[in-house]
Image (cartoon, grey):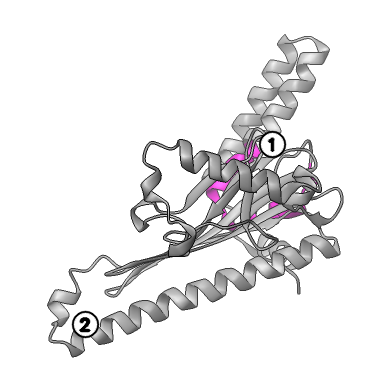
């Protein structure tokens, strides 16, 4: 059973919150009143807005509704990425928050991406849980007490952020963070051409000369920064060149933003370092 079939089953068996039905009916009544007042073309806009409001209400009130929304057709780029699983759990050891995205649609490409995302979320959740367990064992074995341990604010979070979205492309990042005595973060970037059923590359966005364009832009931005000394030079293992494995996302302006993980090209206090490559 794939993710959308599972969503349909959850939707059929889920209890509809009483307040959802009431608010849907209120929205329908309001839509009818507006339809009676407005001209024909405004009625069409009002109906679409009412449907949009009802759908957002369902997404907010019912996880099953949110999952089932993956069966809705994609219109004008809306709902291309949906939250298909969202939950929070806390115990004496840690708090766990998961927001798992998936692409709307049922073709082979979206199924492959969704399977990869699902595996990534499960893997990172398990890794975070294991990190907390190992930290607790080390803490107690070195003289810490259960009472002292209970004062720790350990967190495991797996979530996502949409960076940009058009009618044909979407760019988003799935982030896994574990916070104990030290912090850990793993980001996975997805830059997808939905219409073409493929992943976008820096070459696709910048052309055949993409390596030179990126390298020159990155070196210039480093040199022009307020404090160039925060960046490592080549002898310190700092930036040398981009390649096919270099992470990036597409911003709202349509430009690629190259991302280097924390402490790879600059001091750790800088966090992840980003460079927009203007075209």
Give the percent coordinates (x, y) of residue 229.
Answer: 37, 48
Q: Can residue 97 be seen in this view?
A: no
| Residue that badge 2 annotates | 139
Q: Mark 1 points at which residue?
A: 254
Disc nearest the viewer among 1 and 2 = 1
Is residue 175 something one can see in this rendering? yes
Q: What stretch is highlighted in magenta?
A: 54-74
> Is residue 103 or residue 142 the one in the foreground?
142
Q: Is residue 178 left or right of residue 247?
A: left
Q: How far apart are marks 1 and 2 (CA)?
A: 47 Å
Q: Residue 169 appears in which quarter of the rendering?
A: top right
Quadrant position of the N terminus in the picture? bottom right
Residue 263: image x %, image y %? 42, 60
Q: In this view, does 208 lie above or below 263?
A: above
Q: Residue 38 in the image: x percent, y percent?
A: 74, 10
Does 63 appear in magenta?
yes
Residue 60 is a magenta residue: yes
Left or right of 131 in this view: 58: right
């Amino acid at each position: 059973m794939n993710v959308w079939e599972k969503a349909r089953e959850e939707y059929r068996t889920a209890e509809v919150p009483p307040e959802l039905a009431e608010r849907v009916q209120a929205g329908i009544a309001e839509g009818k009143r507006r339809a009676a007042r407005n001209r024909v073309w405004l009625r069409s806009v009002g109906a679409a807005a009412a449907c949009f409001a009802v759908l957002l209400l369902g997404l907010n009130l019912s996880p099953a509704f949110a999952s089932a929304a993956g069966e809705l057709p994609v219109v004008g780029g809306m709902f291309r990425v949906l939250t298909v699983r969202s939950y929070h759990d806390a115990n004496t050891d840690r708090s766990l928050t998961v927001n798992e995205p998936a692409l709307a649609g049922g073709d082979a490409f979206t199924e492959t991406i969704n399977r990869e995302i699902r595996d990534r979320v499960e893997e990172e959740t398990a890794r975070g849980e294991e990190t907390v367990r190992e930290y607790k064992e080390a803490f107690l074995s070195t003289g810490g007490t259960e009472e002292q341990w209970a004062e720790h604010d350990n967190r495991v979070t797996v979530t996502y952020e949409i960076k940009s979205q058009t009618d044909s492309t979407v760019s988003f990042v799935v982030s896994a963070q574990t916070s104990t005595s030290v912090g850990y973060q793993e980001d996975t970037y997805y830059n997808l051409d939905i219409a073409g059923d493929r992943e976008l590359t820096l070459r696709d966005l910048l052309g055949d000369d993409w390596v030179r364009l990126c390298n020159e832009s990155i070196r210039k931005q480093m040199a022009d920064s307020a404090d160039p000394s925060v960046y490592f030079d080549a002898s310190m293992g700092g930036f040398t060149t981009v390649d096919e494995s270099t992470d990036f996302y597409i911003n709202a302006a349509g430009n690629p933003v190259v991302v280097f993980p924390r402490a790879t090209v600059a001091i750790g206090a800088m966090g992840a370092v980003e460079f927009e490559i203007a075209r």
